[in-house]
Image: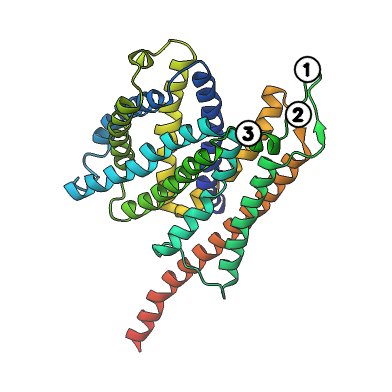
Amino acid sequence: MTVKSCLVESAPFAAMVAVELLDVGLTTLSKAAMSKGMSHFVFVVYSNALATVILLPAAFFFTRKKRPPITLPLLCKFFFLSIAGITLMQNCVFTGVSYSSPTLGSALANLIPAYTFLLAVVFRMEKLELKSTKSRIKILGALVAIAGSLIITLYKGPPILSPPAQPHSEPSPSTMLTATSNNWIIGGLFLATAGFSLSASIIGQAAILKGYPSEITLVSFYCLFGTIQCALVALIAERNPNAWELSPDIELISVVYSALFGSVVTFGVMAWCIQRKGPVFVAMFKPLGIAIAAFFGFIFLGETLYIGSVVGAAIIVTGFYGVIWAQSKESNDKVAKTSTTPLLQGHDVDA
């Protein structure tokens, strides 16, 4: 019984780690497809459209007897949720990177936990009690994790392990960050907007799932409305008809991967974890993706592993432990209060 409860408790953590692993693969494939000239506007439309084709039948087949009725106000909530989490977020990310650099995108993505925590406090999904030790540890852990991801992004330090042969030295992230085009400020604004949009989407999902606890239905309409919105954006922004042609190579592979793992699996797992652990828990895993990318680059791509990546990863793990420990203690306190209240009431009645 103890082993089973431990597995159930650790399932959201393992699921979010898997999501970040899949996201690293999506980033690699999408970069490869767009380096061949694929329009990011078209990429977003195709990937969300394929995800919708997979999700909608599954949602109606598996949840037709269990899900609450779908009303017009609920559809409006799904529509606005898609604007934030798909249309704005995905298009702003690719546009921001094209104006600036992937390094700046990684740096600004570290603000997502901070955005989400602030929005959760504003909408009273998280209690900010500075007198509480658990709240202070949670805030400190989030800041520590963000600091660790910034170290990985902006600082390399001396190399620890290097591949056998290096034809040329790699530029430092700080050099890449400052050596962008003159439009890097515009790119930074797009990327900051993307991070805030994702945080707003996470908060919106948490709010909707409280009254409509059907993750697969939410994700299905999320992708459906996102496809429609992104298609309208693409028709305006992409004037070249040839851009809609999909090559049966890395372009097709990246679209299928993005639909299956970037949308169906990722959105579904995130919604499931949001309902069980809250929005801040989900957002806290974003800095972890940077550490995973650094170590995967060394293992699979033969990139040099630097001291900054190791130190930053250790700091991220420390921050994660603080946040998760504080959240587990808060959950245990809530369970204890819930379990003791009926006993007290029963004692009063007997008295």
Tags 1 and 3 touching, CB below 8 Å: no
Judging from the image, what secondary structure is the residue with disc 1 in?
loop
Q: Earlier in the sequence, mark 1 or mark 2?
A: 1
The amino acid pointed to by label 2 is Thr
- How far is disc 1 from disc 3 in space, using C-alphas? 22 Å
Indicate whether 113 appears above or below 83: below
Q: Which mark is residue 293?
A: 3
| Left or right of 329 in this view: 222 | left
Judging from the image, what secondary structure is the residue with disc 2 in?
loop
Tags 3 and 2 touching, CB below 8 Å: no
- Whether residue 58 appears in this view of the structure is no
Judging from the image, what secondary structure is the residue with disc 3 in?
helix
Where in the figure is residue 66, as x and y percent of width and height?
24, 44
Say which residue appears at 72% left-offset and 40% top-offset.
309
- Residue on which disc 2 sits: 304
Q: Earlier in the sequence, mark 1 or mark 3?
A: 1
- Residue on which disc 1 sits: 167
Say which residue appears at 49% left-offset and 45% top-offset.
192
